[in-house]
Amino acid sequence: MEKNVEISVLCQLYGKALTEKQYEVLTDYYNNDLSLSEIAENNNITRQAVRDIIKKGENKLYELEDNISLMKKVFEEEKIVSNINKELDEIKRLTNSNKEVTKKILNIERELKKL
């Protein structure tokens, strides 16, 4: 996974554990695509300070993910749901004429979408 996407997802999952400044800077850098200079200017700090905040924030996010593994679990669950949906599609195809089975499958698909 690309680092920008990874950090963005980690911020969504663990952003509350960061300091307000770390969260703001990481969001500006990774989600809003601002440069170090732009962030520094907006916050009246140096580019080096921005870089330090980003590195400390990234380290905290990676540490949290190493300990909690929430992102890993979310992606694993998404893969499982996707596989279940594929299997349901195959069952629908095989039981095309059985309306009761099709109805049950549609109910299962609705429930999976709630996850």
Image (cartoon, rainbow, N blue to C red):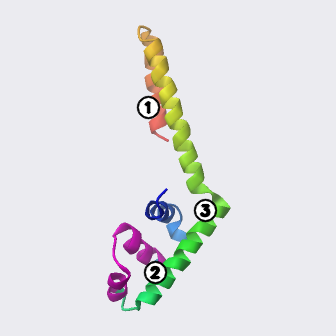
Among the 4 quarters of the image, the one containing residue 50: bottom left
Ranked by sequence position, the earlier of labels 2 and 3 is 2
CA gap, disc 2 and disc 3: 20 Å
Q: Which residue is mark 3?
A: 65
Q: Is residue 58 above or below residue 109?
A: below
* Residue 78 counted in the magenta span: no
Residue 57 in percent (x, y) is at: 53, 75
Residue 111 in percent (x, y) is at: 48, 33
Q: Name the kind of residue labelled 3 in the image.
A: Glu
Ranked by sequence position, the earlier of labels 3 and 1 is 3
Q: Residue at x 37, y 74 (%)?
A: 28
Q: Which mark is residue 57?
A: none
* Residue 37 counted in the magenta span: yes
Q: Tag 2, which secondary structure? A: helix
Among the 4 quarters of the image, the one containing residue 60: bottom right
Q: Which mark is residue 110?
A: 1
Ranked by sequence position, the earlier of labels 2 and 1 is 2
Q: Tag 3, which secondary structure? A: helix
Report if residue 18 is visible in the image: no
Please report the bounds of the magenta region as a residue range: 22-42
Q: Which residue is mark 2?
A: 21
